Image (cartoon, rainbow, N blue to C red):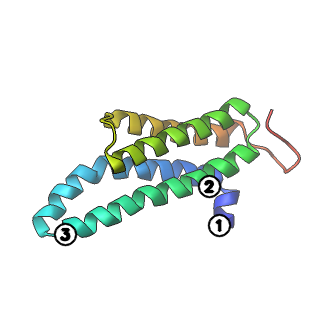
Amino acid sequence: MKLIVVNSDHFGATSSGLCMLHCFLTPFLYIFHSTLGLYNELIFFWYLLNYIFLFISFIAVYYSSKKSTNLFVTISLYFFWFLLSGFIINESLAMFKIPEIFTYLSAFSLIFLHIYNLKFCKCKDDECCTS
């Protein structure tokens, strides 16, 4: 856990990138595994991965926002995390038909914000605060 706290932007960008790759590969893996008869096992594992990525991503957003010097980046990190969470929960529950592009855009936005925060908005010590 301390590794995530210290490198929250790295973990956030990586987690969001893996989430985006996971979403992109899902249709292909369903087709491949359904031909092998592993469909039920795949669905449980694949849905579990969604929430694992969301959990890691939330931890990364939380700690990145605590060390950020840019209030806009902090608010945007939380905003896009909530959007991504909503899209993933909506997809799991099949409540509304929302195009996948919105999931990809919110994940990409999180990647961009974590990288931006890492390069330009990082506190050098524990004394700084969000401004």
Residue located at (42% from left, 51% from top)? 19
Dot 2 and dot 1 residues touching (CB under 8 Å): yes
x then y, percent, for residue 10: 59, 52
Amino acid marked by disc 1:
Met
x then y, percent, for residue 2: 69, 65
> In the image, 57: left or right of 18?
right
User: Disc 2 marks which residue?
Assistant: 59
Q: Residues within 10 Å of mark 3 (few under 14, many from 20)?
A: few
User: Disc 3 marks which residue?
Assistant: 38
Q: Earlier in the sequence, mark 3 or mark 1?
A: 1
Q: Spatial distance from mark 2 to mark 1, Cα to Cα? A: 9 Å
> In the image, 96: left or right of 83?
left
Q: Secondary structure at mark 2?
A: helix
Q: Nearer the viewer, residue 120 or 46?
A: 46
User: Disc 1 marks which residue?
Assistant: 1
Q: Earlier in the sequence, mark 3 or mark 2?
A: 3
Q: Secondary structure at mark 1?
A: loop
Task: Identify the disc placed on residue 87.
Answer: none
Q: Nearer the viewer, residue 100 or 17?
A: 100
Q: Residue furthest right?
A: 127
Q: Spatial distance from mark 3 to mark 2, Cα to Cα? A: 32 Å
Dot 3 and dot 1 residues touching (CB under 8 Å): no
Q: Nearer the viewer, residue 42 or 73?
A: 42
